[in-house]
Image (cartoon, rainbow, N blue to C red):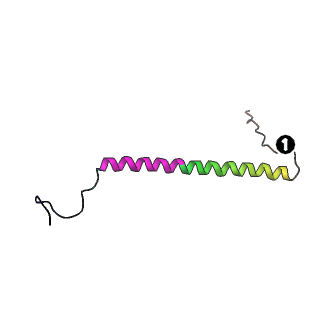
Amino acid sequence: MTTDGEKAGPEPPEEEGNRHVENAVLLGFFVVLAAAGVWLLSTMADVRKVQDCAAQGRRNCAEIEVPDRTR
């Protein structure tokens, strides 16, 4: 039984503003986590290319950046 005329049932939902902030923080966290994963995979691929080159006995395995020529 209930007292003071309260209805028995589910509790009222949390404040919508608070849930929006929590969702935005979680979304930001997952975006940063995904970006870090992509960066880590890219770095690992670059290191693997250099190691494969060195394992074949080549020299100067580092990538050489050449500036674009303008006419």
Q: From this view, report whether residue 47 is shown above or below residue 10.
A: above
Q: From this view, report whether residue 24 is shown above or below residue 66.
A: below
Of residues 59 and 4, the one drawn nearer to the viewer in this rendering: 4
Q: Quadrant of the N terminus?
A: bottom left
Q: Quadrant of the C terminus?
A: top right
What x and y, as percent, mark residue 3?
A: 12, 61
What x and y, as percent, mark residue 21?
A: 37, 46
Which residue is depicted at the point 30% across and 50% down?
Answer: 16
What x and y, as percent, mark residue 20?
A: 36, 49
What x and y, as percent, mark residue 39?
A: 62, 48
> Which residue is under mark 1?
60
- Which residue reaches farthest left? 5
State the image quarter where residue 68 is shown: top right
* Image side of residue 3 versus residue 17, left or right: left
**For the magenta stretch, what is the residue range?**
16-32
Residue 29 within the magenta-colored segment of the rendering: yes
Q: Amino acid at mark 1?
A: Asn
